[in-house]
Image: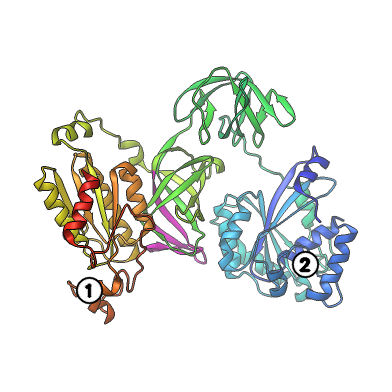
Amino acid sequence: MPLSIETYLEQLQGQDLLRFITCGSVDDGKSTLIGRLLWDAQHLTDDQLAVLKNESKKFGTQGSEIDFALLVDGLSAEREQGITIDVAYRYFATAKRRFIVADTPGHEQYTRNMVTGASTADMAIILIDATQGVLTQTRRHAYLASLMGIRQVVLAVNKMDLVGYDPSTFQHAVDTFQKFAHTLGFDRITSIPVSALKGDNITQRSANTPWYSGPTLMGLLETIEINTPESERLVFPVQWVNRPDASFRGFSGYVGEGKVSVGDEIRVTLSGHTATVTEIVSMNGPMQEAVFGDAVTLKLSKEIDVSRGDIISLSQRPLETTDQFEATLVWMNEEAGLHGRNYDIKLATQWASASITNIKYRVDINTLAHEACTRLSLNDISVCTLAISKPLVYDNFQHSKTLGSFILVDRISNATVAAGMITHSLRRAQNVHTQVLSISRENREKLNGHKGKVIWFTGLSGSGKSTLANALEVELHASGYRTYLLDGDNVRQGLNKDLGFTDADRVENIRRIAEVAKLMMDAGLIVMTAFISPFRRERQMARELIGEENFVEVFVSTPLEVCEQRDVKGLYKKARSGLLPNLSGVGSPYEAPEAADFEINAGQTELDKAIAQLMRSIT
């Protein structure tokens, strides 16, 4: 088995580490190149060599010769198909440097894997098949490498043996790539003619390319300078409050930027609390100073409120916060990203709720053109604005990978749906402030004589939501309660008249209603909402926004066939004839509540009994 990274770190203390990725189009030879590097670095055990020879006979593409690609293509599906579909990491070393290399997929559908591999890389090797030239995926991966902050690129024009080591073919590929890449912000592009299969210009200069005078690939990897970020500020995301016993309380994390020393005065960014660092503890014992990348525990001079997710900085160099920003999103999920939908955001160790407030455009990475779009599909790269539920410590991604990069997580499935890079904070995030009001919700509720609350009716069209909500308001009003009913059709004639019935519009429709219902509840009213609200995520968003203790979800579970028989508005007839393609339950999904506070089948339950049941719970 390959040595673990931990073993390497133990064996090779004192050598610096270069992280790089290989990328390019399918079958450009990325895995073969890495296999050749491992072979030439003499990094194979006897057991590995025996397995490689055996598997080359079964799966190899080189006849009786060793197929170096099999060293990297570890998944059986990859070996059978002859392609890379996952990110394969390998660790190796020479006498001069340690390396971690990520072999990233070439297929467009695995763009998310390529982004994963590029996220921690110092440089990229972009391969071009000399017989094919610059292809769509070459451009895609060059753009993604730039997007992920990689500034040093090696352009390896591979399979030169198949074009007779022709210098004009090499130069044409280089010129084409340079023309495309000149706007991508790379600091350095080094072009090398290679044959990964034959070993030309990999570790030894090839006699087949006397016209080439540049470095070999391994020579470049061993000598290229790694631009370690230097910063005068401290960024220390807290991962854990470390309290092994009553005598010790420290804050564990990693130095994401800058350095911290014993005696430094630090600040907890969001709370503003300050203290002095009295101890720095690592797995190897006490330290006087911790620098970028170090994982340590800080002990402070006094007890202050610090918890997981806080960001510690130097007190004289405070960090900025924002609750709205523009970012580039790489969408990584099969389910589309929608304007207005809520997700969880993780930025460094900070967590909050986030919603996409605007999808500005999608990038066509073949031409870099900006295209209008209304949703985010798998592998889309789009520029969006996001609103966050609370201020987060942030920075521009170009200035700080630690504070400028984040992920979005689906709140239902917990799947990572997107990776994002912050462009800038929105000005309104600094210009809009909460105004303190003299009259509070409690004052209004006291005057009204009852608590504010939101009764959220959900169900299919024709299920009886509006009938139930209206009857409940009549009963509440007769009992002296101050109420208001927000009905789906009525709201769409005014506040939401600009919205249609696409999934994205339905999400935005419910977002607005939830905000309005919260304001009306703040006025001390009992608010009833009668909306299909077909998606669980948005109903959960409304519950969290309004507050668990103030939110009552009523699922009107009248079956579809009963709703369709009623068809009071003629919507089902239109849907079945193709005139209404997005009707919930027919052409668009309805996600029934899994644990509603009340469930009422209006086709079986008498209206009076249903209202009496609701009244008992509300009053």
Q: Is residue 365 magenta?
A: yes
Query: Which residue is nearer to you in this view: 344 or 619?
Result: 619
Q: Is 302 left or right of 616, judged from the image as shown?
A: right
Q: Is 540 left or right of 293, judged from the image as shown?
A: left
* Residue 579 lies in quadrant: bottom left
State the quadrant of the N terminus: bottom right
Percent coordinates x, y for residue 38 in the rendering = 81, 58
Residue at point 15% right, 56% down?
470
Dot 2: few (<14), some (14–19), or many (≥20) neighbours within 10 Å?
many
Whether residue 250 is visible here, answered yes or no, is: yes
User: Which label is found at residue 70?
Assistant: 2
Q: Secondary structure at mark 2?
A: helix
State the quadrant of the C terminus: top left
Query: Which residue is nearer to you in this view: 283 or 418?
Result: 283
Percent coordinates x, y for residue 596 in the rendering = 34, 54
Q: Is residue 592 magenta?
A: no
User: Which label is found at residue 222?
Assistant: none
Residue at point 31% right, 37% down?
431
Q: Secondary structure at mark 1?
A: helix
Point out the stretch of residues depicted in magenta. 360-388
Residue that lies at the very extreme toward the bottom in this rendered image: 577
**Residue 433 to residue 189: above or below:** above
Residue type marked 1: Leu
Percent coordinates x, y for residue 369 in the rendering = 45, 63
**Residue 241 to residue 597: above or below:** above
Q: Which residue is mark 1?
A: 571
* Residue 338 lies in quadrant: bottom left
